[in-house]
Image (cartoon, rainbow, N blue to C red):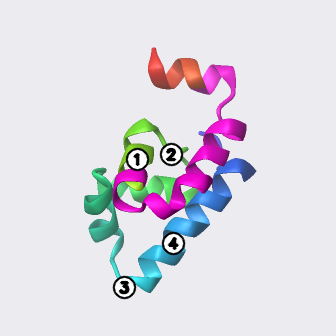
Amino acid sequence: MKRRQAHAQVLVRALRDLQQQEKLTVAELAERLGVSSSTMDMVYAGWRSPGPKLLRGVLRAYPQLRQEVYLFLLRGMSNSEYEDTYW
C-alpha cells in the first residue's frame, strides 16, 4: 500500500483538527462522515487515500472544508487512482 501523498495531508489535518475541536472519537467522526472507523484509521495512517464516499461525507458534514476537498481532487488523483476508484 502507498503512504499518504502530500496532497491528502491538508485534508486529513483539517479533519483531525475538527475531530479534536469537537472532541469526537475516530468512530464518531467516521459515523458523521458515513464511513467505517477502520476507513478513517487507514486514511489517518496514510494507508488509504480519501475516496468518494469519505469526500461526500466531508462536504455534507463539514461544508467549510470544501476548499480542502477541491484542492485534494484537483491535485490528488492520478489517472491510475481515478481508474482504481471509479471503474
Q: Looking at the image, is mark 4 or mark 1 earlier in the sequence?
A: 4
Q: Which residues are magenta?
A: 59-81
Is residue 80 found left or right of 28 in the rendered image?
Answer: right
Return the residue at label 4: 16
Left or right, residue 71 beside residue 57: right
Task: Mark 3 or mark 1: name the one nearer the start of the chain.
Answer: 3
The residue that mark 3 highlights is: 23
Q: Nearest the camera: 47 or 54?
A: 54
Alpha-carbon distance for marks 3 and 1? 20 Å
Nearer-N-terminus badge (4/2):
4
Q: Which residue is mark 2?
A: 50
Circle 1 crowding by C-alpha within 10 Å: few under 14, some 14–19, many from 20: many
Callouts 1 and 2 close, C-beta under 8 Å? yes
Q: Amino acid at mark 4?
A: Arg
Residue 64 magenta-highlighted: yes
- Crowd class of label 3 (few under 14; some 14 to 19; many from 20; radius 10 Å): few
Query: Against 82, is 69 above or below?
Result: below
The residue indicated by pointer 1 is 54
Q: Nearer the viewer, residue 75 or 87?
A: 75
* Earlier-in-chain disc, 2 versus 3: 3
The quarter of the rendered structure image containing the N terminus is top right
Query: Mark 1 falls on what kind of element?
Result: helix
SS state under label 2: loop
Query: What type of secondary structure mainly makes up the magenta span?
Result: helix
The location of residue 9, given as percent across then percent down, is 66, 58
**Spatial CA span between label 2 and label 3:** 22 Å
- Which amino acid type is shown beneath numbered disc 2? Pro
Residue at image location 47% in from the left, 75% down from the top: 18
- Is the Cβ of the residue at disc 3 closer than 8 Å to that at disc 1? no
